[in-house]
Image (tube, rainbow, N blue to C red):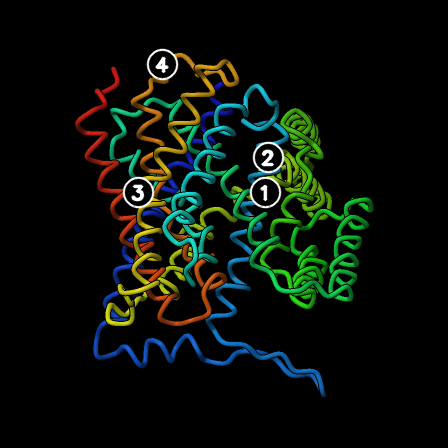
């Protein structure tokens, strides 16, 4: 049983760690191109119009839009799947198990936002208060992986659960704060898409690709409603079943019975039995597990690096470190590099001391401190929120530069802290 639980977690950690390296490369490439003689061509690339036209119906948007609002829907779909799985059978299954990461995540959202608001009160940058609330799981796991011999498994589990709750908080903020006025007709369209997906589930429609159709309807409805369309991914992820149709034992029994009765002389019968075995193989695990297993590498090695390439290219001369821009810059860096560690570690340790949450055996305060520090690596979600908060190009470039500096600071401090403070774990 233990190996069945640990193996998928180890796979997720490995993918996230490798994804962190690729994200770093994509960020470096974007920064170099945005500050080179190819800057104009690089920026023009993201404004390339892409769309379709059917009769009088036309929908055309920039490549940047399709990456941030289209491709990132897949990222949010995987986030929704992970939330669904954690609620069903993971760290969020019961309040007792979720208490420690829940309190850590709450502290990790409220304190950075509070630090930012304290520094930006009364300025034009106040609307960016949610930017330092997010944690980038790929970079954070990457740092823990570099310190592998010093980091016990409990800290990996705390970070993963914390990141899931953190994502829920970011999703709520995007939906409530950074969406425009809600148009009722859009909500009706989205509701039809959700109803269609539920109807397909009720009718036992299993192929995942068929759910793309109601997914597109939900996406279009949210866009028409003025809500951020990527939320469609979260909604569909939360609707995905967590119970397998066959299950491991059903797969074993079905496969065994078909193998025992295979007639190699009857080609049609052989093909039929192979089809049945293949169907049982696909349904040996739940749709949530199967989709996470299939999509997670694509998101980690495809969607997120492309997003970084399209959003991390900050022209250094475009940022303004004077006036309100200075406080945006300082607020984001302080929120990520200072507010996150104080919020995560502070509330986790306080809740443990008060008996609100239970700290697992072997999880020391210094280890929770490390999770708090690497939790300050914002990057992906912070870069996603920044253009929702700032439409002014100068303020946006300033915010992006602060995200990169704050995340890099948290990363370097985390590595240094881990090497100095944490001891190597016995083999």
Q: Nearer the viewer, residue 234 or 8?
A: 234
Say above or below: 234 vs 86. below
Foreground of the two, 120 or 128: 120
* SS assignment at label 3: helix
Q: For the view shown, which residue lies furthest in the bottom direction?
A: 56
Depth check, mark 1 against mark 3: the one in front is 3
Q: Is residue 244 left or right of residue 104?
A: right
Question: Which one is in front, 49 or 209?
Answer: 49
Distance from disc 2 to disc 4, alpha carbons, whole Å, reads: 26 Å
**Residue where numbered disc 2 is placed:** 85
**Residue 340 x %, y %:** 37, 38
Residue bearing the label numbered 1? 81
| Residue 234 pos. (x, y %) | 61, 49
Give how far apart the Cα atoms at labels 3 and 4 are.
Answer: 26 Å
Q: Nearer the viewer, mark 3 or mark 2?
A: 3
> Depth-wise, is mark 1 or mark 4 nearer the camera?
4
């Amino acid at each position: 049983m233990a190996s069945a639980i640990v193996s998928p977690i180890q796979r997720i950690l490995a993918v996230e760690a490798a994804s962190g390296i690729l994200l770093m490369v994509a960020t470096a490439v974007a920064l170099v191109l945005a500050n080179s003689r190819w800057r104009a061509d690089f920026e023009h690339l993201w404004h390339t119009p892409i769309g379709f036209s059917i009769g009088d119906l036309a929908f055309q948007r920039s490549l940047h839009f399709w990456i941030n609002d289209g491709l990132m829907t897949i990222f949010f779909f995987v986030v929704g799947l992970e939330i669904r799985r954690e609620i069903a059978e993971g760290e969020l299954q019961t309040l007792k198990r979720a208490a420690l990461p829940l309190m850590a995540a709450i502290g990790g959202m409220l304190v950075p936002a509070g630090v930012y608001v304290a520094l930006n009160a009364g300025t034009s940058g106040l609307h960016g208060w949610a930017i330092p609330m997010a944690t980038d799981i790929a970079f954070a796991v990457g740092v823990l992986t570099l310190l592998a011999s010093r980091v016990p498994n409990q800290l990996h589990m705390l970070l993963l659960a914390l990141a899931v709750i953190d994502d829920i908080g970011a999703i709520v903020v995007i939906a409530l704060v950074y969406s425009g006025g809600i148009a009722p007709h859009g909500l009706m369209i989205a509701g039809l898409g959700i109803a269609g997906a539920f109807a397909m589930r009720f009718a036992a429609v299993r192929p995942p690709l068929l759910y793309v159709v109601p997914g597109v309807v939900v996406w279009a409805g949210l866009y028409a409603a003025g809500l951020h369309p990527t939320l469609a991914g979260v909604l569909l992820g939360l609707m995905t079943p967590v119970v397998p149709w066959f299950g491991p034992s059903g797969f074993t029994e079905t496969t065994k019975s078909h193998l025992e009765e295979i007639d190699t002389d009857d080609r049609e019968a052989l093909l039929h039995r192979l089809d049945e075995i293949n169907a049982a193989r696909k349904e040996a695990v739940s749709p949530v597990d199967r989709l996470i297993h299939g999509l997670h590498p694509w998101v980690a090695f495809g969607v997120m690096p492309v997003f970084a390439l399209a959003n991390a290219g900050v022209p250094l001369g475009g940022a303004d470190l004077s006036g309100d821009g200075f406080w945006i810059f300082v607020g984001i860096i302080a929120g990520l590099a200072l507010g996150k560690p104080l919020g995560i570690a502070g509330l986790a340790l306080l809740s443990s001391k008060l008996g609100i949450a239970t700290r697992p055996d072997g999880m020391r305060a210094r280890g929770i401190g490390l999770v708090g520090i690497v939790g300050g690596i914002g990057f992906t979600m912070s870069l996603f929120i920044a253009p929702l908060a700032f439409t002014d190009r100068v303020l946006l470039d300033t915010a992006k530069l602060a995200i990169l500096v704050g995340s890099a600071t948290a990363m370097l401090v985390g590595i240094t802290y881990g090497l100095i403070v944490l001891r190597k774990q016995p083999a």
